[in-house]
Image: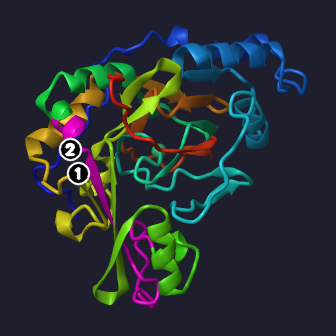
Amino acid sequence: MAPLPDYIEPRWWQGAPAQDPSLFTIDCAGFSMNDADLAPGSELAERMNGTFQRVGLVYLVNTGLRDVQKMRLAAKLVMRNEMRYEAGANPRDTLEPNVYEVGAPLQAHLHYHHEMAYVGTSTTMLGFMAKTAVGMKGATFVSDNLQATDAILATDLGRKLKELGLCYHRDLTDREAFDGSEQIGVYNHWQKSMLTDDPEAALKFAESRGLEVEWGPQRLLKTRFYVSAFEYFEPLDRNLLYSSIADDGMWFDTWPKVMHLPYDQRPLKLTFGDLSEMTREEKALFVDIYDRFGVPIDWRVGDIAIVCNYRWAHGRPGITLQASEKRELGVMLGETFERVGDLPGKW
Ligand SMILES: [Fe+2]
């Protein structure tokens, strides 16, 4: 199967990092990374928190760590409160206790996005830990969202997003309708998402989370969520871009078993808040805005990154591994917050 002929391929960065990596990289070779270093209040903790406050990004290299639970302790020096998965989000499979999998096929590119922008309860930050790695080939990219926000607001697309907001359309399939047929990973069953087998309870729960809902054929649960394309970020006292085309059918452009499907058969769709469609030009610009400010994080085993979900978007190109190669990233999600959208006068 091949992608649709005119799909939009991100280029991730301009070939040079949009911010100097020395601003957010901490070389841990000078630390023993023992229990004392991994305890709150340590010199390492101070440096990590100072860096995170300044840049919204901390990248630990040369940690010497191989144990993912030790890496998690290091990440927790910044991420004090981890998120607990509740109904309404997409529960993820775990790599280890409290460490999630990326939940997407390696060969698919993952457009830049802010984690959980499509629900009313989002997360403040996320952590990545390299259990196995293939260097630059398996790089994650982060995009400087302060620059991306300024850039998009200078365009007609940005002004339109500001004025109209967005509508996230998601189709949740019925587990029973899929019974016996091959599970295709992108189709999320409402039973799993809403943590109930009762359609009434699922409906009520979705409505309680601010979703508009209706049933489609084969008990397809169709949800709509209206929200700003931006989110107010208190520490900088300004609205920041908080959306991307990762929540459109485009997310699946290079996913096995889905990439050949027309957009109206994919489970995600993003429109403006008045339900008008985005043009291909607008979508291409939305991709380009993030690509302009990209920075690669090229993993080696033991590397850890903590990423502020307001100040940075994240994504990665698709890759194909050789038989001898492995790339496994553990994911941690930080404290949740209720989205407020943009605030007036904070542009
Ligand atoms: Fe993500």
| Magenta-tinted stretch | 160-188
Disc with the residue nearer the chain's start (2 vs 1): 2
Residue 27 is at least partly visible in this image: no
Query: Distance from label 2 to label 1 (Cα)?
Result: 5 Å
337, 303: nearer the viewer: 337
Residue 160: percent from left, percent from top:
16, 37
Picture quarter containing residue 95? Answer: bottom right
**Location of the C terminus (image quadrant):** top left
Against 210, residue 334 (above or below) is above
Residue 271: percent from left, percent from top:
21, 53
Q: Amino acid at mark 2?
A: Leu
| Callout 1 crowding tier (Cα within 10 Å): few <14, some 14–19, many ≥20 | many
Query: Which of the labelled discs sits on residue 164, or is there none?
Result: 2
Picture quarter containing residue 340? Answer: top left
Question: Which residue in the protein does label 1 denote?
Answer: 273
> Could you say whether the residue bearing mark 1 is in a helix, strand or loop?
loop
